[in-house]
Image (cartoon, coloured by chain):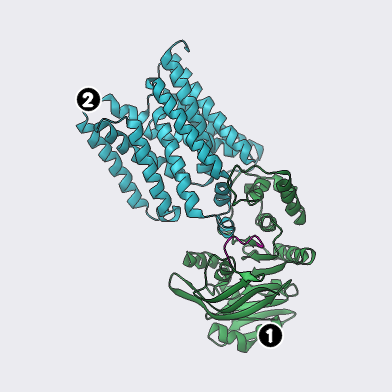
Chain colours: A cyan, B green
Amino acid sequence: MLQYDFMRNAFAAAGIVAVVAGVVGYFLVLRGQTFAGHALAHVGFTGATGAALVGIAPLWGLVAMTVAAGIGMGAIGERGLAQRDVAIGIVLALSLGFGLLFLHFYTAYATQATTLLFGNVLAVDRRTVWVLAGLGAASLALLGIISRPLLFASLQPELAEAKGVSLPLYSVLFLAIVALATAECAQIVGVLLVFALMVGPAAAAQRLCGAVAAGVVLAAALGLAEAWAGIAAAYYSDWPTSFWITALSAAAYLAAVVTERLRRPGMLGPL
Amino acid sequence: MSAIEFRDVRLALGGRLVLADIDFAIPSGDFVGVLGPNGAGKSTLMRAVLGLVPPARGTIRVLGRAATRGNPAIGYMPQVRGGLPPLRLSGRDFVASAVDGHRLGLPLYSRAGRAEIDRVLDLIAVRDLARRPIAELSGGERQRLLLAQALIGRPQLLLLDEPLISLDPHHETEVIDLVKDLRRELGVTVLLSAHELNPLLGAIDRVIYLGNRQAALGTVDEVITGPVLSRLYGSDIDVVHVGGRIFVMSGGRSVERDAHRHDPAMAEHREMR
C-alpha cells in the first residue's frame, strides 16, 4: 500500500499528528482539561469553514480560530469556565451553527462538511504534511520549554503559585499549544473526533504508567500505533480511517482500564 | 531574628477585611499552632507570609526580609481539598514536580535533583511508599508525601495548612510527631494551622489564635483563656481543662467540634478566591 503517494502522505501526516496529540494530550488529561480540547475543536469548525468561504485553506482558519479561543479560555481561567457551562455550551453550538452557515454560502463542495467534521486523512497532500510537521514541531518545542513549570502547576497549583509560578500565564500558554494540536488532529480525524487522538492514548497511558516520562512516551507511541493501524485497516477494509482510529483508541483505553483493574484486584469503580 | 514579623498589618480579600491591626513576631525555631474559627483567616495569614496576599496596610517580614512571592526559604503544604487527583502517577514523581518547578525546561532531574528527592523522602521515611501510585495511598500517607514535598529546597520556615484535616486521631498524632521531629532535626520554624487545639498540646511552643479580625499570640496558657478568646469570638467563651485536654466552650457547646466536620475549609477557600 505504500507505493501510492496518497498513502505515504497519510502515514506521514497521521504519524506526526498522533505523536503531537499524544504528548500534548498527556498534559491535557493530567490537568483534567479534556473538555477544553473538545470545545476548541468545535470552535475551530467555524474558523475552517469561514476560511474556506473567503478562499483561504481551512487549516489556517482552524489554527487561527482555535488558538484565539484557547488563549481566551486560558485568560478566563478553568474555574471561570467550569461555572459557565451553559454559556460555553451555547457558544459551542453557535460556532457549529456558524460553520454550517458558512458552508451553506460556500456551495462548491458538499463533501467539505464531512471532511471537516470527520476528517479525511487520505486526502492530505504533500504540502499539508510539511505544514503539519512545522506546526507540530512548534507546539512540541513550546511545550518542551514550559513543561517543567506546567507539570508543577498541574499537580500542585497552590504550591507552584507560592514558589513563583504564574498559574494564569501557563494556563494560557498551554491552551494555545492545545489549540495548535487540536487544529492538527482535526486534519486527520475531523473536529468531532479529536478526542480519539488527543485524549484516548493519553488517558490509556496514564492508567498504565507511574512515571511522567514513561507516560508521555507511551501516549505518543499508542497514538502512533492507533493512527497507523487505523490507516492500514482502512486500506484493506475500505471502511473510513477515522472510524478505525476511534475504534482502536477506544479499544486501547478499555484494555488499559482492564489491565489496571487486574493489577489491583478488589478495586472496582467507575471507568 | 524573628522568623515572621507582622507590623500593623491589615489583610483584605476581595474587599472583605479579614485581619486588621495585626502585630506579632514569631521567634526562629518555634513550633506555632494557628487556630481560630472558620473564615478567621488562617489560610489568608499563611498566604500573606508567602507573599500571595499583599497587606493592605503595614509590613510583613519573613526571615528578615519583606514577604515576597516565590521565597525559596519557605516550605508550604497547601490544604488538601477533596484529596489529590486519583492518579496512577507514583508518589515520587508527584513529589519531584516541586524540584526547581519554577524553572523552564523539561522535567528531567539532575543528580543533585534526584538526591534532593531522596533526601526529603528519607526524612519522612516514605521512600518505599513513594513508589506506589498516589491513587492507592490513604489520607495519612498522602499527607506524609505532601510534607516531604514541602521540605524540597531545604526551607527554614514550614507553613502547614490544615495537615490534620480528615485524619483519624491515630494519624493526627503521627503527623504531629513527625513535624516535631523535623523541627528538632532541621531547626526550622513551623506554622501549623488546625481546627482543634488538643492534638497539638505538648508539641507546640505557641499558638496564634485568630478571630474577630484580630490575632493573639502567646503560649497556650496565655492565649487559651476565657477573656482572650471571648474577645476573639466576640461572645462569652469558657475554657475548660479536663484531664490534660482543653475545651473551648460557648454556651455549653464546644466551638471546635461544631466547626469541624462538614469540611468548612472549602468555604474558607472559596472566599479567598
What main secondary structure does the magenta stretch of the protein show? Answer: loop
Question: Which residue is label 1 attached to?
Answer: B222
- Pointer 2: residues within 10 angstroms few (<14), some, or many (20+)? few
**Residue B122, placed above or below residue B1:** above
Which quadrant holds residue B168? bottom right
Would residue A78 be counted in the magenta stretch?
A: no
**Does the stretch in magenta take in B69?**
yes
- Residue B232 at x, y percent in the picture: 56, 83
The residue at 67%/69% (across/down) is: B63
Amino acid residing under circle 2: Ala
Outermost residue, front side: B65
- Check the image and name the residue furthest to the top: A3
Q: Would residue A192 be found to the left or right of residue A204 on screen? A: left
Query: Which secondary structure, mark 2?
Result: loop
Element carrying mark 1: helix
**Residue B109 at what x, y percent from top left?**
68, 44
